[in-house]
Each structure stands twice: as C-alpha cells, then as structure tokens.
Amino acid sequence: MNGRVAAANGRPEGRPSRQINVILRSQEPPVLSSAVPEKEPAPAQKSVVQHTLYQEIQKELDKLVGLENIKEFVFEIYALLQIAHLRQEAGLVSGGQVYHMVFKGNPGTGKTTVARIIAKLFQKMGVLSKGHLIEVERADLVGEYIGHTAQKTRDLVKKALGGILFIDEAYSLARGGEKDFGKEAIDTLVKAMEDHKNQFVLILAGYSDEIDYFLQTNPGLPSRFPIQIEFPDYTVDQLIQISELMAKERDYILMPQAIMKLRQHLIQEKNETEHAFSNARYVRNMIEKSIRNQAVRLLNLYSNTNPGKLELMTLRTEDFKLEAKGST
Ligand SMILES: Nc1ncnc2c1ncn2[C@@H]1O[C@H](COP(=O)(O)OP(=O)(O)OP(=O)(O)O)[C@@H](O)[C@H]1O
Ligand SMILES: [Mg+2]
C-alpha cells in the first residue's frame, strides 16, 4: 500500500486513478513458489468494476479537510476486503481480520465522523449487516448496582449488532479502579467480543494518553484492538478551511476580513486554551453563533425592506463576536 500519498496540493484528487491500481496482477513479477502456477489465467474483469462500491465512501472522505492518514487507512481497509473477497473466490484462505479499533485524539478531530464512514464501508463490503453506529459513554454503560452494569452493557451490544459500538472517553470506564462498576462494563464488553465475534465492531475513543492508560489496565485489551488511529489536532489553516466549508454547506459566505479575524482568534485560542481545544467542533459552534448574530443584525438593519440574497448569505466581521479562552 506504500506510495498511496496525497496529491501535491494535499487534496486526495489522485485517488480515483489509484483505485484502479488495485488489481490482482502485481506490476512486479511475483516470487513463485511451487504451489503457484507459472502462467496465471487472465484476470476477471469484475475486479475493476467493483471499485464503484468505494466511490460513495470516497465522496464522504473528500469532504473532510486533512486527515490524510485516515483517508489512507480507510482505503487500505477497502483494498483488504476487496482482495479478501477475490481470494475467497479463488479458493484461497481469506478473512480472519479483527477490526476493533482505538481512535486517539482531542475533541472535535473527526473521530465520530470517521467512525460513521467506516461503519458504512463495512456495511457495503458485507462485514457488517446494518452499518449503523451506536455512540455511548460511561453513563450509558455503567449501572447503579451489581449486575445492572452487565445488563446495560449487554443491551447496548445487542443494539450495536450488525454495526459499530463507539465508546467515547473509554478510559473513564477504568477510572474508579477494581471496585468501580466500570470494570464490570469492560469485562462484559470483552466477553461480548468473544460471544459475538464478527457481528459488531468496537471502537474505543479518547485522548491519546488516557486511552493508552486504559488499555494497560486489562492485559486482555491491547491485543483485542489491533488497529490504533491517531487523530491529530487541526492546524489553523485547516480550521479556516473547515470554517469555509461549514459556511458553504449552510449557504453562507465568509467575508475576507471575517476570515482574518477568525484566523487571529484561532491562533490565540489554540495557543492559550489550557484545556484541550475542541478543534472542528469549536469552529462549528463559532460559525453557528455567527449565523445567529447575522440574523439579529439583518433584522435590526432591514426594518422596512428585505435584505437581498447576497446579504442573506454574507457573514461579516461584526457577526463574529469572539471572546478569548475556550468559549465553546
Ligand atoms: N476534517 C474535517 N473536515 C470538515 N469537518 C470536520 C472535520 N473533522 C470534523 N469535522 C466536523 O466537526 C464536527 C466535530 O467532529 P466529530 O464529532 O467527528 O469530532 P469528534 O472527534 O468525534 O469530537 P468529540 O471527541 O468531541 O466527540 C462535526 O460537525 C464534523 O462534521
Ligand atoms: Mg465524537
């Protein structure tokens, strides 16, 4: 899978041609063992046609700014499943992969969004029957008396069958130590992973160091989560791109001066916020607040006439009433 890097401009436009690179015949001559016939029969046409399956997933990934490592990873999973399918057809050993994952990153770095896309990919590729996402946190899993937690956890696993069970801030399950009901939830989850093998995918999400700590609390855990993905904080440039995208999706445009103001504010927030900066979620809240401010400004401004279409679309500097220090 090496060499599948983003196009020079950082956007993954190169990917469509890359899709067609996944064919059964390698460009380099394979090392032949005695078990491999010297002459391969002509490959079936079908393998290329199947890539249309990936197009919808690719469209969703393309909407996301940055996250190049994650886009690569999703394509890897797709390639693996596609090849496993072809290997199965060719009578070769296939499958046996474990897809439980750990997502490490700060708030608002796209973890839930990516989990939804992966759920859809698994559904399309036949790994999961439904492809839905059940997102839970400690309070959803942990009960109030002995036995309650196991029941709550089992019920949620049941709901997640055929899809993904996504546990946010998973480390909080290990917070209270041995006597805490969180431990009961972990034990129940580990058992469910055995009992319902291949029927659901478990994703644990949270801050990097806390997730590492969590995995250490139970010797059975690390090997059950072979896939670990880092969600890095967005750069200020990426946050600006995300703001413009979010405005566009809502049929708004940002004035250049507003973008400048936003940029200054983001630089300051990222540097000065003591608690974890909430990345794209912070930006989304800012855009939504500015949309409310614009509505009030327009109503006050146009008491006798109606604002024109452009005015309805435009977010100006004064719509961004930005307060310093973690205002989300
Ligand atoms: N790379 C991106 N490009 C565009 N929008 C993004 C990107 N990453 C996240 N977003 C948007 O930011 C918001 C927050 O993303 P998401 O909920 O996936 O983050 P998260 O990591 O799950 O956050 P949390 O840890 O707080 O649950 C969503 O509206 C999402 O669409
Ligand atoms: Mg989330």
Image: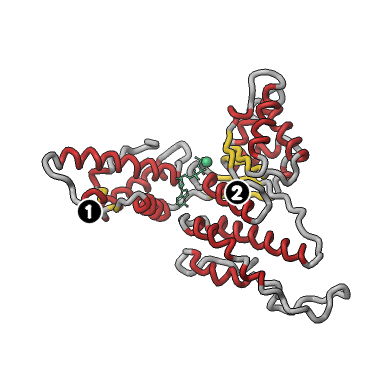
Q: Residue 263, image x and y in percent?
A: 34, 50
Residue 310 got which mark?
1
Check disc 1 and report its element: helix, strand or loop: helix
In the image as oriented, which residue stretches furthest toward the top?
Answer: 145
Q: Is residue 241 left or right of residue 233?
A: left
Check disc 2 and report its element: helix, strand or loop: helix
Q: Residue at x 30, y 42 (%)?
A: 290
Location of residue 15 with respect to 257 vertically, above or below = below
Mark 2 Cα-neighbour bin, 10 Å: few <14, some 14–19, many ≥20: many
| Residue 245 lies in quadrant | bottom left
- Of marks 2 and 1, which one's residue comes earlier in the chain? 2
Location of residue 100 with respect to 181 vertically, above or below = below
Q: Residue 310, image x and y in percent?
A: 22, 53
In terms of depth relative to the viewer, which is nearer, 315 or 133? 133
Q: Is residue 249 left or right of residue 312?
A: right
Q: Residue 26, image x and y in percent?
A: 70, 75
Q: Is residue 141 left or right of residue 302?
A: right
In terms of depth relative to the viewer, which is nearer, 82 or 262? 82
> Which residue corresponds to mark 2?
119
In the image as oriented, which residue stretches furthest toward the left?
Answer: 304
Q: How are the residues colored?
A: secondary structure
Amino acid type indicated by mark 1: Leu
Pointers 2 and 1 in contact (C-beta within 8 Å) = no
Q: Is residue 19 left or right of residue 195?
A: left
In the image as oriented, which residue stretches furthest toward the bottom?
Answer: 39
Q: How many marks?
A: 2
Amino acid type indicated by mark 2: Ala
Q: Residue 210, image x and y in percent?
A: 61, 38
Q: Residue at x 69, y 31 (%)?
A: 154
In terms of depth relative to the viewer, which is nearer, 276 or 89? 89
